[in-house]
Amino acid sequence: MSHDASPRPLRAQAPAAPLSGTHRVPGDKSISHRALMFGALAIGTTEIEGLLEGEDVLRTAAAMRALGATVEQQGPGAWRVAGRGIGGLVEPADVLDMGNSGTAARLLCGLLAGHPIFSVMTGDASLRRRPMLRVTDPLSATGASFWTREGGRLPLAVQGATDPLPLDYRLPVASAQVKSACLLAGLCARGTTRVVEPEPTRDHTENMLRHFGAAVRVEDTAEGRVIELEGQPELTAAPILVPGDPSSAAFLLVAALLVPGSQVTIANVGLNPLRTGLFATLREMGAELRIENARVEGGEPVGDLVATHGPLRAVEVPPERAPSMIDEYPVLAVAAAAATGITRMRGLAELRVKESDRLAAAAAMLAANGIAARIEGDDLLVEGTGGVIPGGGTVVTHMDHRLAMSALVMGLAARAPVAVDDAGFIETSFPGFAALMNRAAGSEAIRPA
């Protein structure tokens, strides 16, 4: 699960034929992390189908094993977790290495805060640069103690609370990771944990808590969305079918919208309304994007997405949409590069603390390939060409998998090939990305640089 230190440059060029066919993307990363964690906290054995087997999720599986759960792979995407019950995790014998996964690290802080055990967590060079105070500060109110490097960075040590207190916390900015960490800590606390978020964020944690039998109340109020969790429930093992990740589907969808003559179908994609801000934005831009075979599986809406090439027009993306598409802005920037007019994406402060400063990195990606882009405050402005993207540049990825995939999508729609300095980190969230894109293209449009 370690990333080879030597860079793996890739290059993408316009395919000889349009993108076509029906494809499946890997399982939803957010749901996969949570399925393993809740399985470890439940009584009984949880059967999981469609688990994302990227490096990020495998780190979570390894951490749950280290904390005493039995986690076994039964076949491709099929996993079984024998849980230990609420409060039943054991002290790990070694450091927990979360690799590149900020989601796993932050959610795990909540899990560990509620258990009276000592543990140490680290990650790769990218994760060790990312701030953790946004979760450790509120979690300290449970009675847990945290020690970090300067700036709240990993490696991090935590001594969980012996008798954790329930939290009553209002998030200063919308963050599904911070919300989820607080709820995970609240599972071990007596009484009601209350979290208020200023804007609704992805609610996979709330959905899965209910799926496993916890009492969760959600109410939209004047102060924001209020989530209340009754502490110390008995979670009961429940089967989970993980849908395709909408954040992964985004790359093939945008490629199909930009490469002339293309039409692709992506089967079995999660369509949680708190995750589909990109799809709404693309439709506003004039994209021909439709949903077929809509259904509900395991408490999550699912369907097949069909994307057809066509012209796009610039839009202004409101800041309140950011939580529902926070991972999709780099690939939206690629779509905006081919649109007619200036697209303005507002309120992107959250992008500054992703795997890279994703706001600055996205602007640099566009500039390197002939697209005028600028940052004004926390807004990204992209001047579209109304047609073909010039391309021809090499993108510095800063160990950011989504930036690397977005740049390669741009290469498929550009006049000249686009290269990335390192694509090794793509495997953390989208194993087989290049192979899937090449299948859709019917040729090796993405290849080693």
Image (spheres, helix red, strand yellow):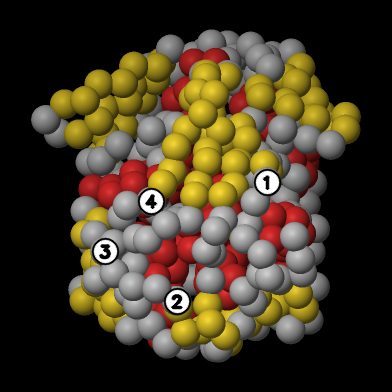
Measuring from the top left, give residue 431's x and y in whole percent.
Answer: 73, 54
Where is residue 34, by image quadrant? top right
Q: Residue furthest right?
A: 74
The picture places residue 58, in percent across and down from the top left corner, at 75, 47
Q: Residue at x 49, y 50 (%)?
A: 308
Q: Is residue 105 above or below residue 346?
A: above
Left or right of 369, for residue 383 = left
Helix, strand or loop at disc 2?
Answer: loop
User: Which tag, 2 or 1, sits closer to the chain's start?
Assistant: 1
4 or 1: tag closer to the N-terminus: 1
Q: Amino acid at mark 1?
A: Gly
Badge 3 amino acid? Ala
What is the residue that sits farthest to the left in this orientation? 222
Residue with the mark numbered 1: 21
Discs 3, 4 touching: Cβ within 8 Å: no
Q: Give 392 or 404, whichever is nearer the viewer.
A: 392
Q: Disc 3 or 1, which lies upstream in sequence?
A: 1
Answer whether labels 3 and 2 touch (C-beta < 8 Å). no
Q: Distance from label 4 to label 1 (Cα)?
A: 18 Å
Quarter residue 397 falls in = bottom right
Which callout, 2 or 4, points at the residue further toward the start of the chain? 4
Question: Label 2 vs label 1: CA separation?
Answer: 23 Å
Q: Which residue is mark 2?
A: 388
- 407 or 155, which is in the foreground? 407
User: Looking at numbered disc 4 in the image, what kind of residue is underneath it?
Assistant: Ala
Which residue is at 28% across, 49% downward?
Answer: 284
* Vertical arrangement, residue 345 with respect to residue 278, above or below: below
Alpha carbons under labels 3 and 2: distance apart = 15 Å
Q: Which part of the image, by quadrant, shows the C terminus?
A: bottom right
- Which residue matches tag 4? 287
Q: Which residue is mark 3?
A: 314
Find the distance from the CA under tag 3 to the CA under tag 4. 11 Å
